[in-house]
Image: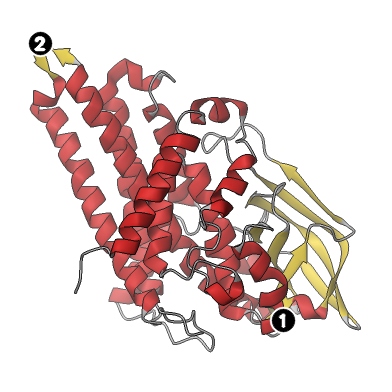
Amino acid sequence: MNFEFSEEQELLRKTVRQFVDNEILPHIADWDTKGGFDPIIWKRLAEIGLMGVCIPEKYGGSGMDYNSLAIVCEELERGDTAFRTAVSVHTGLNSMTLLQWGTEQQKQRFLVQQAKGEKIGAFALTEPGAGSDVAALSSTAVRDGDEYILNGQKTWISLCDIADHFIVFAYTDKAEKHNGISAFVVERSREGFSSKAIKGKYGIRSGNTGELFFDDVRIPAENRLGEEGEGFKIAMASLDNGRFTVAAGACGLIMACLEESVKYCQSRSTFGKPIGEHQLVQQMIANMEAGFQMSRLLVYRAGEMKNKGIRNTRETSLAKWQSCDFANKAADDAVQIHGAYGYSDEYPVARFLRNSKAPVIYEGTREIHTIMQAEYVLGKRQDRKLNRMLPKWPFED
């Protein structure tokens, strides 16, 4: 076991932290209020190689390991959850899915542009009537010669109005239930495609989230990922990658809660002494630190398994569940430490608390992950090696 970061990883962390300090933190309060961030951020992310950090160089990426992606997500969420979400969706859910399941032609056509930051990718699984119950989705893709005709609706899709490429899941044979779902790469430019943002979100306000609509959208058969009926398998494998990035981001949110709480503890006094000297405040600080350290260990263990090409559904589920719960509690405690000021926009901790709730829900609710972990322990759930795995790191030329 090696618990040290490499020099390259330390440099990456420093680079992303400087990016957050210079490009995000000075503006995030305003962006959060307005409900959107400056699009120039996408260009800046691409310029420092963060749009394809763990994608092989031959596909336009930086060629770094999967734990480097965790570092990026951790540091971005220290700035705001919206930016980690953007990388989670673009890289974790879309680009890594193309890397794992795409044909060489699909990788050259879609992945290279995304890894370079020339195009943005997104992921469309959730529907108004199908969240945790994926088999309840109603979108359909009917074969018509060399094309599929896609109809349906997706909701709670991050980057809905921004992304150029979407990985979309639909039934090609509803009678087969889970085994009748297929996956497709759908370009925004396709006739019959439209999107609409959701307004009035409780948190992650600067991020773009909304609905997608498909009205007789014609998709070339060459845009299908994997074989017909492999969509559910692809979706679950993709969520392993997405959950990994969400868990890493939660570590960054706990870090932000700690930084702001310690700063406030050192500047605010009550009953004749700094509030950091009150034991119940110290207890909250200690719990944040414990949650941060435990979450980080779970995340980087899952990342190392990815590096070795080992399936990590169980480990990633545990990391996502625990780190998101720890982050939600850390944000709640950060508001409590700030007292009445924490309940206002004068300090960022109120935003932390609003942002911390969504990750407890998406990409598997805490209840779903609780059941998964119990089933693993009870011997009722077992993961088999997939017929297509993420490439091991270091990547082969």
The secondary element bearing badge 1 is classed as helix
* Residue located 67% across and 39% down the image: 198
Judge whether residue 40 can be spotted in this image.
Answer: yes
103 relative to 76, above or below: below
* Render colour scheme: secondary structure
Residue 305: mark in rendering:
none
Front position in the image: 136 or 24? 24
Kind of residue at disc 1:
Gln
In front: mark 1 or mark 2? 1
* Residue located 49% across and 79% down the image: 390
Check disc 1: other Cα within 10 Å, few if <14, some if 14-19, many if 20+.
few
* Residue located 44% across and 40% down the image: 20
**Which of disc 2 and disc 1 is earlier in sequence?**
1
Residue 271: mark in rendering:
2
How many marks overall?
A: 2
Quadrant of the snapshot with the N terminus: bottom left
Q: Point out residue 189 in the picture as x, y percentages from the top left corner.
A: 84, 58
- Is 286 left, or right, of 101 in this rendering? left
- Is 272 left, or right, of 172 in this rendering? left
* Image quarter of residue 314: bottom left
Front position in the image: 70 or 288? 70
The secondary element bearing badge 2 is classed as loop
Judge whether residue 233 can be spotted in this image.
Answer: no
* Residue located 58% across and 41% down the image: 207
- Is 80 left, or right, of 292 in this rendering? right
Residue 105: mark in rendering:
1
